[in-house]
Structures are given as C-alpha cells and as structure tokens.
Image (cartoon, helix red, strand yellow):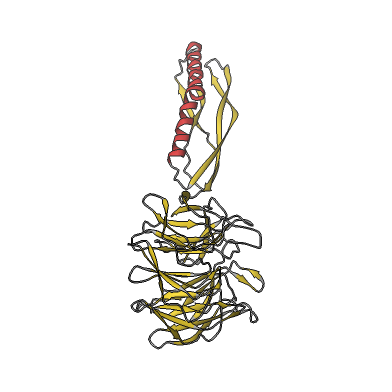
Amino acid sequence: MNSQNLQISEWPIPQASPSYSKNLFKRTSENKIFPTNTSTTNVNQNEKSLSQNTFITNQTFFPIVLGVLLGTLTSGLVLSVVTTVWLTSSTQTSTTTVSTIAGTSITRNVSFSFIKISYKQCKTFSQKWTITGTLNNARYYHTASVLTNGQVLITGGQSINGNLSSAELYDSSTGMWTATGSMNYARYYHTASLLTNGKILVTGGLGSSGILSSAELYTSSTAAWTVTGSMNYTRYYHTASVLTNGTVLVTGGQIGGTFTHSTELYNPSTGSWTTGNNMIYARGYHTACVLTNGKVLVIGGYTGSNGYMTSTELYDPSTGVWTTNGTLNYGRRYHTTSLLNNGQVLVTGGQSTNGYLNSAELYDPSTGIWTVTGNMNYVRYYHTATLLTNGKVLVTGGLSNSSSYLNTAELYDSSTGTWTITVSMNYSRYYHTASLLTNGNVLVTGGYVTSGNYLNISELYQP
C-alpha cells in the first residue's frame, strides 16, 4: 500500500483586538492511501496534481486571501480606531514524500509563502473642532451670553485699540457674526447676566475712566442698550448671579487696590440696586454658583494680604444671610465652577500659593463638604469649563504657566471622577469665552495668545 503525506495551508482570519500579531498560516496533515495497483504513472499524475494544488495555494489563493483578510480587518473598524497594518512575507518549506509499490520514493520540497500581519489600534476622536465665523473685533476679557433666541451676545473686553464698548451677535444657523448696538461704556472685567425677561444686564468692570459702578441693559428685539441704575459700589472681578426670584446678586470684587465683602441686589422690575448683607470674607477673582436649592455658593478667590482663599460661603435668598460652608482643599483663584446634573459643584484648576493647579474638587450640597476628584491632565488657569448636554464638563485652553498658552481640551465624567483628553482646539487661547449652544455644540470665542496678539477667531466643538 502506498501513502502520501500532503501539507495543506489554511488562512484563518483573526478577530480584531487592541493588539494583534499572528502568523496567518497553519499546516494540517492529511494522509492519503493509494491503491496497491498504483503505477508510476499514477504516482507521477498524483505528483503533478500535488504540484498544481501547491501552485493554486500559493499563487491564486494568496491575493484572494490577502484581500479577504484586509477587507475583514478594515470593515470591522469604527471611527474611533485607526488600524496600522504591516505586511511581511515569510517562506516555509515542507516536504512531500510519495512511496511507490516498488519501494522507491519521490520526495518534493514545497515552499509555502505566508504573510504576517501586525496591527495596533490607536484611539482617535469622534469629537472635532471647526473654525466658524470671525469676530469683527479681536478681543479678550469679554463676556458671552446665550440669548433666548439662541444667538450669542459678546460684549466689551480689550483689544489692540484699547477698551471696547462694541457688542456682536453670533448666529449658529449661519455661523456668522454681526455687529449690534454698542454699550454706553467701554468695559472689561465686567459681568453679563441673562435676566428672566430675556434682557442682558452688564455690571461694573474697568473702563477708560477707571473702575465702574454703571450698569446697562441689552434688549435683543431692538438691538439697543439702555442705562439702568448704577451699583452702590464700583467693582471689577466680581460675580453676578441670577436668583430664582429674578433678582441679581452681585458679590465682592476689587475696588482700587483693595477687595470688598460687600454685596448688592438688582431688581429688574424697578431697575434699582439695594445693598445686601456683607459676605463673611472680602474677596475677588472668586466664582459663584446658584445651587439647585436656590442658594448661592461663593468659592475661593483672592484677598491680597491673605492670599489665595480656601473658604466658601453660602447665601440664603430667603433670609439674606451668609454662612461659611465647607473649605476647599486648595486655595485658588482664576478657577472655574460648574453645576453638575447631580447637583454637585465642580471646581477646576486656577492659581494657588504653590503655582498653577490641575486639581479638581467636588462640593456636595447635602453635606457641605469638598472632596478631591480626579486631576486634569494639564495645569491651567484663565480657562473655561462648560457643562455639555451629555453631562460631561468640557475644559478648554488657558495658561499652564506664565508663557505656555494651551489649545488642549479635556472632558470630566462625573460617573467615574476621571478626565480624558479630547481633540485640541485649532488655536491656543486664554481669557476666552465658551458658550453651550442650543444644538449642543460649544462656541469658543476670542482670547489672548501671546503678547499683543488678540484673537478674532471662533471655534465650534462638536461632542
């Protein structure tokens, strides 16, 4: 009885995995039994058939299999994965022996070519930044407010020509900026608040004549500004918070070379200001957040001689009383504050005694306690933080030291307490603004890049 051992190649297709490297070649042995009357001719015929099969395996199947493999790999990719493929060829020799009835044998060495595919999956971003309309005036230290009609109003700031009174409107449906009515006073380091009646209230700041106490209202239906009652105190680097009853609470800030603990309340129905109870601590460069229970939380800041503040205070509109409430783990100014969907408050970055911060902290209103959460990937101050429609917080730009301007952006996930880097902006910037549009995109506007360079470029982040 004659026997022949055949080496047959198989081409398994791998399943995608984060890291994969495998020889796409496998040999299996198959024993074939020839009848006892097999002649030399038959042996030669079988040998010829073997040669033909070998030729088909290596020549015809190779491009077919290669196409199937690459097609399978690429079709299984998602947008967030880039697969890099390296092809290397190898040759493996196997021996085929045919034994004849006469006891002689024919030995053939058959070379099989195979490929080795290695690929790595590299994370890319489904999010993106795109350049949108250009401001008519490059600016920083300005404010941005989303109006009830979905447009974004930019007011004041500084530019190469000095302090600005101009204002501009962004239309997300066209991606265009148009000039609207100018404020009565040029100003920067001011505040802008959307009132319950749809108007924008601008207060204080620094102007050509110094520190301002003036306030004015923008009406979108007429594109005009009107002067309203002035605050009782001049101030800049203060905060303004719209309370649930529609009044506006202004706190702290800087008055000349000193910081104040004074507060004021604006009544939109009368256009007048009344003095409120003083905060417990004087402060400027702080932040303020209206909690879900209607109370106002004032956070951190700077007091000059007392340095960077860790104290936080709580204002109760029903009583007008301030109480100390929790202490930050790190004193900070130039930080951001965001009210999360779960009612907690997220504070990020800023400047402290020991330099610039990448730390973040969470305030729990139910306990009044601050706890440290995950650190950002970059230290930053003069940055922005925006609560997205998916509940994550987008942080953009800022300074990482006195001369490093950032275009980086990262996302905070409150469910995990972690930060992940997202795609970077097209331009580095700080002292810019970021606004959540009604379509869920984020509009970043203006800012400062290097000495004397102000931006008129706006970008859109698409989550």
- Residue at coordinates 47% horizontally, 26% vertically from top-left? 61
* Visible residue check, residue 108: yes
Quarter of the image where one finds residue 23: top right
**Of the pair 29 and 261, the residue shown nearer to us:** 261
**Of the pair 78 and 243, the residue shown nearer to us:** 243
Q: Is residue 140 above or below residue 14?
A: below
Q: Position of residue 258 (x, y in %)?
A: 60, 80
Quarter of the image where one finds residue 161: bottom right
Q: Position of residue 397 (x, y in %)?
A: 55, 59
- Left or right, 183 with respect to 439, comes to right
Q: Position of residue 260 (x, y in %)?
A: 55, 82
- Residue at coordinates 55% horizontally, 23% vertically from top-left? 96
* Visible residue check, residue 366: no
Q: Position of residue 33 (x, y in %)?
A: 46, 24
**If the image is split into quadrants, where does the C terminus sit?**
bottom left
**Of the pair 400 and 44, the residue shown nearer to us:** 400
Q: Is residue 382 above or below residue 88?
A: below
**Of the pair 374 and 5, the residue shown nearer to us:** 374
- Left or right, 148 with respect to 110, comes to left
